[in-house]
Image: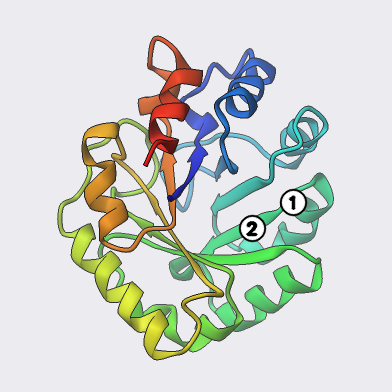
C-alpha cells in the first residue's frame, strides 16, 4: 500500500488547523507543504513561521517541498520550524550535493525533486544520500493541473535506477501533480511509494473520506 501526503496548497489557508485535523482523521502519512517564492515558480505561498505553526498543530511528519531559488539559504530555518522531510529542486541548486548534505546535517530526511522536463541523471550523483525523490507530474507552481502521462515512464525508470544503485529500500518515490483516485492505481503500479494529492482531497465534499479512499488497497 502506498502512502498518502495531502497537499495543503489546496486547503483553506484561513483554516489550516482543520486541514491538519482532516489529514490525521483520514490516516494520512505525511502533510505535504509547498513552499513557493514567486521566482523559481510563478506563485507565492508560505514560509518558516507558518510551517512552525503547522508543526505545533499536528503529529504528522511535515513533507516540505521547496520550490524556491537558493534553497540552501533556508534549510536551517525550515528544519528548525519542524520539517521532517525537506525536498529541494535539482534545477535550483548549483551545488546539489552540498545542499543535500546540509539537509542531512539538520537531522532531517533529504529529498530531491525533478520537473517534468528534467532527466533522471540530474539526481544520480546524490542518489545514495537521499531519502526521497519527488517526480513532478505537472509543471510546478499551481495546483489543479492534469497529470502528464509520460510521468509514468519516468517513475518506472526511476524505480529501475534506484534498484541498480542498490538503494531502492532506502529511497521513497513520491509523485506530485494531477493525482486523483481514478489514476492513483496506475501511478502506484509504476513504482510510486508516496502520492501527493491536493485538489482530490481538499476540494472533495469529505476530505477525510477522500484520504481514506486513497489509503484503501
Q: Residue under label 2, please give it.
A: 86
Q: Residue at x 29, y 65 (%)?
A: 155
Numbered label attached to residue 150: none
Q: Residue at x 26, y 46 (%)?
A: 185
Crowdedness near tag 2: few (<14), some (14–19) or many (≥20) residues, C-alpha within 10 Å: many
Q: Who is closer to the viewer here, 2 or 90?
A: 2
On the image, the x and y values in percent for residue 212 come to 46, 28
On the image, the x and y values in percent for residue 105 come to 80, 73
Q: Residue under label 1, please give it.
A: 78
Examine the rendered structure and indicate whether residue 19 appears above or below residue 87: above
Q: Quadrant of the C terminus?
A: top left
Report which quarter residue 46 is drawn in.
top right
Q: Is residue 216 visible?
A: yes
Q: Secondary structure at mark 2?
A: strand
On the image, the x and y values in percent for residue 206 come to 44, 12
Sequence-first tag of 1 and 2: 1
Q: Who is closer to the viewer here, 160 or 101?
A: 160
Examine the rendered structure and indicate whether residue 151 appears above or below residue 23: below
On the image, the x and y values in percent for residue 196 come to 44, 43
Kindly check if marks 1 and 2 are in contact, taking CB atoms under 8 A apart as contact.
yes
Examine the rendered structure and indicate whether residue 131 appears above or below residue 217: below
**Residues under labels 1 and 2: Cα distance?**
8 Å
Q: Is residue 95 visible?
A: no
Q: Secondary structure at mark 1?
A: helix
Q: Residue furthest top?
A: 205
Amino acid at each position: 500500500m502506498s502512502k498518502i501526503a495531502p497537499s495543503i496548497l489546496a486547503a483553506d489557508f484561513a483554516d489550516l488547523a482543520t486541514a491538519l485535523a482532516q489529514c490525521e482523521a483520514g490516516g494520512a502519512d505525511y502533510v505535504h507543504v509547498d513552499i513557493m517564492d514567486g521566482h523559481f515558480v510563478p506563485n507565492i505561498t508560505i514560509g518558516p513561521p507558518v510551517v512552525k505553526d503547522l508543526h505545533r498543530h499536528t503529529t504528522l511528519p511535515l513533507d516540505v517541498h521547496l520550490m524556491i531559488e537558493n534553497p540552501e539559504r533556508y534549510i536551517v530555518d525550515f528544519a528548525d520550524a519542524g520539517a521532517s522531510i525537506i525536498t529541494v529542486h535539482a534545477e535550483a541548486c548549483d551545488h546539489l550535493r552540498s545542499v543535500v548534505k546540509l539537509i542531512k546535517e539538520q537531522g532531517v530526511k533529504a529529498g530531491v525533486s525533478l520537473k517534468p522536463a528534467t532527466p533522471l541523471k540530474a539526481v544520480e550523483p546524490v542518489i545514495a544520500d537521499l531519502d526521497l525523490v519527488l517526480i513532478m507530474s505537472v509543471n510546478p507552481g499551481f495546483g489543479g493541473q492534469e497529470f502528464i502521462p509520460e510521468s509514468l515512464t519516468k517513475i518506472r525508470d526511476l524505480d529501475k535506477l534506484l534498484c541498480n544503485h542498490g538503494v531502492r529500500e532506502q529511497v521513497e518515490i513520491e509523485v506530485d501533480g494531477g493525482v486523483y483516485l481514478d489514476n492513483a492505481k496506475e501511478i502506484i503500479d509504476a513504482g510510486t511509494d508516496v502520492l501527493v494529492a491536493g485538489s482530490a482531497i481538499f476540494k472533495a465534499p469529505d476530505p477525510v473520506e477522500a484520504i481514506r479512499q486513497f489509503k484503501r488497497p
